[in-house]
Amino acid sequence: MHDAVKQYYGETLQSSEDLQTNACCTDSNLSAELKTILGNIHDEVLAKYYGCGLVTPESLNGCHILDLGCGAGRDCYALAQMVGESGFVTGVDMTEAQLEVAKQHLDYHREKFGYAHANTEFKMGYIEQLDQLGLADNSIDVIVSNCVINLSPDKEAVLKQAFQLLKNGGEMYFADVYADRRIPAELKNDSVLYGECLSGALYQSDFIELAKKVGFADPRLVESREITIDNPDIIERVQGIAFHSNTYRLFKAPELEANQENYGQTVTYLGTISSHSAGFELDQNNYFAANQATDVSGNTWRILQSSRFKEHFEFSGNFDRHLGAFTPSNSCGANQAKSTQNKAPAIKSSGCC
């Protein structure tokens, strides 16, 4: 399957117009800031982009980011602008033709960004073999991926090695395709369906269990959308399976529990994350209005405490007294505040697959 994917993305596809489904869709709903960032990227890199949206977690300045399945480097060059000259972006891909495009434009982007030294590098390799890239364990702040992990034949190896590379408090933030059931073997062997990011998709419940198995104890869903397939032949071939594009955050945080537990803790978001002055959304169940104390579970408290977001919060409480299962009493109010506040335009991912 590695060879089939290499051929599909290195030879069969010449531009995004060659894709046969909309599972990997075009960028939509991007902020003005992201459009400016993408406008700084070389045309050839943009033309060789087969992913969807742009996976952009918040507060990246100075971070070392690893992009799994970087292709021709579009996301890497976008993230290189977000981490700044003090940060660094490493892209890994197994398709030589794609990496050649990425590497050809290193100097172009360094000059375009006004950096004295390039803050981007590209490595040839398999995302199941991250231990062979020469990267130290516990050295990466953020790992991103955009519609690539579904193409891997060994997803457990990808997640396990990603966990090992992340620093304590680090995060894996990625968009991918998930199925509403386990994919039959005959569809997994269909090279077109596999290359179109469908037949390699995990059953979502299996993904959650796999993430927990390798150490990501509390997977957080950021956003989800149904994938529609505007191709009658593909619709017939997938045999009624429904697909969704989900963006997840997986934190490498200490002492996370299996369930959301209540210790009476609160956090107050300071409104200091760039482009998120009115509020910050950690995931679908946790939105923090600025300067407002918000009840959180012990897991959320520990995630925020150990991550790069710590400096943007004030923390109240400890783990001395357990109060039972966590059921946020202010979730309705938080959701209402999220929908009604006049927020500054946020840099938000629009990952489609």
Image: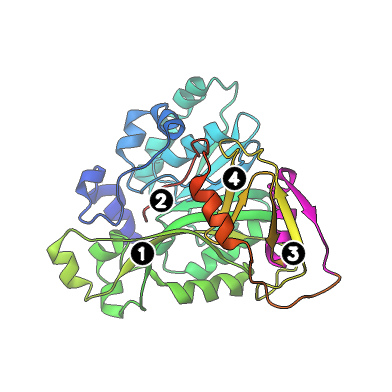
Who's the residue at 77% across and 75% down the image? 323
Q: What crowding class fits label 3: few (fewer than 14 Cα within 10 Å), some (14-19), or many (20 or more)?
A: some
The residue to which callout 2 is attached is 351
Who's the residue at 48% across and 68% down the image? 155
The residue to which callout 3 is attached is 254
Q: What crowding class fits label 1: few (fewer than 14 Cα within 10 Å), some (14-19), or many (20 or more)?
A: many
Q: Which residues are magenta?
A: 298-319
- The quadrant in which the N terminus is found is bottom left
Contact check, label 3 and label 1, Cβ < 8 Å? no
Residue that sits furthest to the left in the current view: 232
The residue to which callout 4 is attached is 279
Q: What crowding class fits label 4: few (fewer than 14 Cα within 10 Å), some (14-19), or many (20 or more)?
A: many
Q: Is residue 243 above or below residue 276?
A: below
Which percent across, then down, holds residue 206? Answer: 47, 76
Q: What crowding class fits label 2: few (fewer than 14 Cα within 10 Å), some (14-19), or many (20 or more)?
A: many
Which percent across, then down, holds residue 100? Answer: 39, 38
Q: Is label 3 or label 1 in front?
A: 1
- The quadrant in which the C terminus is found is bottom left
The residue to which callout 1 is attached is 244
